[in-house]
Amino acid sequence: MDMRPEPFEPPAPQPRTVPPSRLQIIRTILRNPLELWGEPSYTLPWIETRFFREHTLIVNDPGLIRHVLVDNAQNYRMADVRQLVLRPILRDGLLTAEGAVWKRSRKAVAPIFTPRHAKGFAGQMLGQSELYAGKYEAGTDGGAVFDIANDMTELTFAILAETLFSGEIVSSSGNFADDVNALLHRMGRVDPFDLLKAPGWVPRLTRIGGQKVLDKFRAIVRNTMDQRLARMRAEPDAVPRDFLTLLLEQAGPDGLTNEEIEDNILTFIGAGHETTARALAWTLYCVANTPHARAAMEAEIDGVLATGADPVEWLDRMPWTRAAFEEALRLYPPAPSINRAAIAADRWTSPSGEVVEIPQGITVLIMPWTLHRHALYWDRPRAFIPERFLPENRDRIDRFQFLPFGAGPRVCIGATFALQEAVIALAVLMHRFRFEMTAETRPWPVQRLTTQPANGLPMRVTPRSGGARPG
Ligand code: HEM
């Protein structure tokens, strides 16, 4: 008989039982869109609805998702609200490019994100995680409280800065991480005028001052590119093989323009660290509340590290650690919504013969947030049960019911990088420390670009007596 206690149900808004008024919708979208969704979004396979004048199809059915993201992907473009928020910042970077520009860029950038290159970054991921663990060691003195949400952002930023530029950022302000935070928080917000579809020339109050930050930021990226190009010419055999060099090597008539390289650097900074950081913080929080999972992870991590295994192998050799991270990605998907618009009218027929008409122009919302908590597809959807993702159970999960990284031609190009980074960071941190609850650890998920804990995530960090340094 299984004597395990009831699984932990981490905090999340209850589905709404009464539809919100128009005013409530606006307020909730601005404050926390995760609180918007009603019971039907968590129980029905698809819902046709209207947000203001916007004709919208909410899609949860894995077959219909596959149709939109893969089988007929060419009929769907990025939805307007997402583009209004992100395109002014990222321009023709991969996340926001469309049509022929996106196709050429994806082809040029794909070789940089092969598993072989991700593996090449394992050393930097380990090095930066150990440096960060060293900071904890200096600060814990037998146990201290840290804001884990902030710390994981610092750690993943350090890893990104190392793998992107080998730390060679030409920043005038001295603290590039602060520049990044200012940019993400000033620019990347939905404004009431975006929802009301006001034309682009109407100033967005929430973004005032953001353009100045963006200009400064782009100047830093351009300077860094120029310096690296000069080095590539002067000492071609001695330049680091980081993302910057790999991207600059893709310049040319069939590859990327200089502006597109700049846009993609900004895109990797925007898409490539806060996402992983959020999921890492949620993992540590959920694991702190699930003792048997923590024990399994600690045993697995200690065991693999004792063999001196290369960090390149950790992702494959730590199934519990990977499963806990994936379960956190399920409950708190860093990208909670994947939005598309239908270019032409479309139709999908379910295996039982139901027909879904998809009119031209309709917005299609595929929301990992509701899909991952959906009553039709998950047992105990609100509970943290990492066992679901262990290799022996994994094939019970449909490819299109778990979409933290999206799917189809526009699937996240950094997924392997993020998974490897997360397992290495978790292994280093959990080998050396325990992360525990305090009376103040009461996170509430909010959607602000990513799914993050409102007001941070304070946790007690205590050195583990048995945990020796890896390597
Ligand atoms: C846990 C971490 C991450 C999550 C949850 C995540 C999630 C996603 C999702 C859902 C998409 C698809 C969006 C759509 O179809 O509309 C996406 C696209 C993308 N991601 Fe990630 N991502 C993560 C890490 C990264 C990293 C580490 C990088 C780069 C260093 C990255 C770069 C990108 C780029 C460039 C795209 C656009 C791909 C395209 O449209 O061709 N992401 N990501």
Image (cartoon, helix red, strand yellow):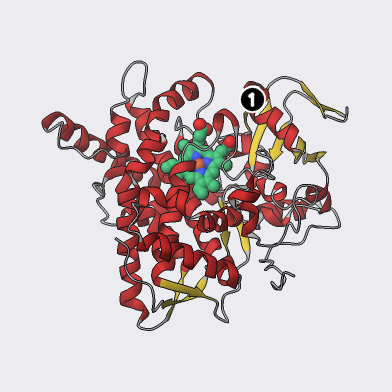
Residue located 33% across and 74% down the image: 137
- 10 Å neighbourhood of mark 1: few (<14), some, or many (≥20)? some
Q: Quadrant of residue 308?
A: bottom left
Q: Position of residue 290 (x, y in %)?
A: 61, 70
Regarding residue 455, the answer to whether it shows in the image is no
Q: Residue furthest top?
A: 253
The one of 470 and 283 positioned closer to us in this rendering: 470
Residue 189 relative to residue 69: left or right: left
- Residue at mark 1: 73
Amino acid carrying mark 1 in the image? Ala
Q: Position of residue 447 (x, y in %)?
A: 61, 54
Q: Position of residue 190 (x, y in %)?
A: 59, 47
Q: Is residue 97 above or below residue 458?
A: above
Residue 116 relative to residue 336: left or right: left
The one of 100 and 361 positioned closer to us in this rendering: 100
Q: Is residue 401 above or below residue 65?
A: below
Residue 194 relative to residue 436: left or right: right
Residue located 42% across and 52% down the image: 314
Tell me the SS state at disc 1. helix
Q: Residue furthest left?
A: 234
The one of 307 and 372 positioned closer to us in this rendering: 307
